[in-house]
Amino acid sequence: MGKLAKHVILLIADDVSSRFFRKIYDEGKLPNIKSLGDSGIVSDKCVTTYPSITLPTQPNIMTGAYSGYYPKSGSGIPVYHWFDRDSNPPQYRHYSNLNALRQTHEIEGNVKTLFEQIGEGNSYSLVQYCSRGVTKIFPPNKFIAAIFFLLFVLLAKKPENSHKVVTKQLINVFKYPKLFFRNSQRPIASTAYYFLTDTLMHDHGFDSDRYIQSVLDLDDEVGKLITALKQLGIYDDTIIVFTSDHGNYKADQAKDLAPFIKSKGLIPYSKKTGTGDFDCSFGSVGFFNFPGTNKNWKVHPTLEEMKHFKPTDSDLKINLLDMMFEIEGVKFIYYRAENNTPDKGTIKIRFKNEDDKIHTAQVEYMGETTKYSFEDVDVYGYSKDPRASRIVDGNFHTIEEWLDHTYHLDFPMMPDQLVRYFINPRSCDIMVSTVATVCYNYEHGKTINTHVYSHDVGLRDSMYVPLVIGGGQGILTPKTLEYCKTTDIVPTLVELLGKKPHQSVRGKSLLD
Ligand SMILES: [Zn+2]
């Protein structure tokens, strides 16, 4: 370990795929970010969390951990929309708009944010709400956040300006720490979240001029930050990270799920009455929640109950598992086997092949190791690849082994990630995927738009994010990493500050 950093700054741009980033980076269109990369650590196969949705990917970056099973005090955030069976009455949760502020309360004490892991000293967070333990956050509360979003997103002709406001505020924290903190110490760790790139990606596409320009503009923001830190004389002691939470894809088509749901007699869960047959959010990956025995939403249904489910508006019982393949485009169905525990169990996989035949596979887990096996068809195609085929060997493997063997393929480290999602008691009962063929844009009983640009699947373009760790003088040894994962970022930053990552961290420092 060489010289330590005095400041670390983590910049997360929402929804920037590694493929696109790499292209403009190599074309010289991101000169400021490249100046960081040339002095530091770069990877274009930084593998994010599955499902590749803003949550859990961002909280997992901010904690260096996954949202799995934390039985003592609840659980991490499994996904952007989830069903809270413990609340009274049970209700679905999501993080759209001002609900984003709930994150800090809904990640539990078993994991620690970057700010909690660095301990004493000032820290600052801009628009990043998985920030428990931070000294100051902006916007500080729902009221100011509402004004901020209204001014820069809804009312502004050019909401992209919100990114400039974020950078300006970050620079001011370094310039005038006394205005932000009780003492005049500059923040040891700070984070800024550039959120608008995601809105532009969904609304206009990753191939639209407006989205492309918004990412190019971020390089100017990084340039302003570098210049300011140099003027203040602290650049040589500061490490800057530029990354994203997930990539993206364009689905073949958008479809409306509502008519299908109606045809089955299924009634969506109502927050008002606390009743209903199901709750669901569905992009290209769908998360279905059902009530347990006697339509009790406090508990998960058993497999038998899902196989003989009586919808409110139907006289017939239906098999919910079989029903999922009737939804156009659904290729994968995932669900828990009976009697799973946090330490041991099985996630069942059903896969519909191009010939419409259904094949089964499974992931067994023991502690934090997983074993993938299949009946007649390798649903992830690992066996066809010389490197990946070595890990389909009937043995249990760690996350590092899965990453090492499958990082270069679609569905990177998928067996590991499936289990980490499903052992969370807040996870859904049946997860399905159309693998980016059909996008449903369905949320809690309604189809909200006809977008075809999204992110959530296990394909590489959705699972890879760019990672550039640079800056400082004599702190980093320049290198290009063939692969890494987003949970490696926080342990790297914690180590650069001379501290030890918390025991819950599942990533590993990239400095070794
Ligand atoms: Zn996102």
Image (cartoon, helix red, strand yellow):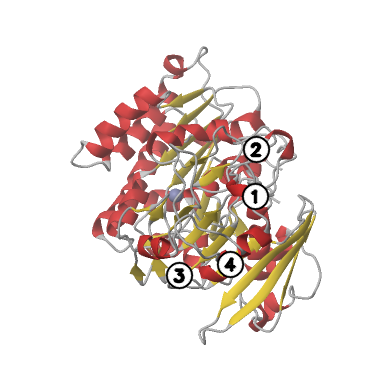
Q: Is residue 227 above or below residue 215?
A: above
Per the rendering, the mark at residue 321 is 4
For the residue marked with disc 2, what is the amino acid? Val
Q: Amino acid at mark 1?
A: Thr
Q: Residues within 10 Å of mark 1 (few under 14, many from 20)?
A: some
Spatial CA distance of label 2 from label 3 is: 45 Å
- Residue 131 in view of the camera: no
Q: Residues within 10 Å of mark 2 (few under 14, many from 20)?
A: many
* Residue identifier under label 3: 327
Of circles 2 and 1, the one toward us is: 1
Q: Mark 4: which secondary structure? A: helix
- The residue nearer to you, when weighing 244 against 333, is 333
Discs 4/1, front: 1
Q: Nearer the viewer, residue 329 or 201?
A: 329
Which residue in the protein does label 1 denote?
293
Query: Looking at the figure, which quarter contains the N terminus?
Result: top right
Which residue position holds label 2? 494
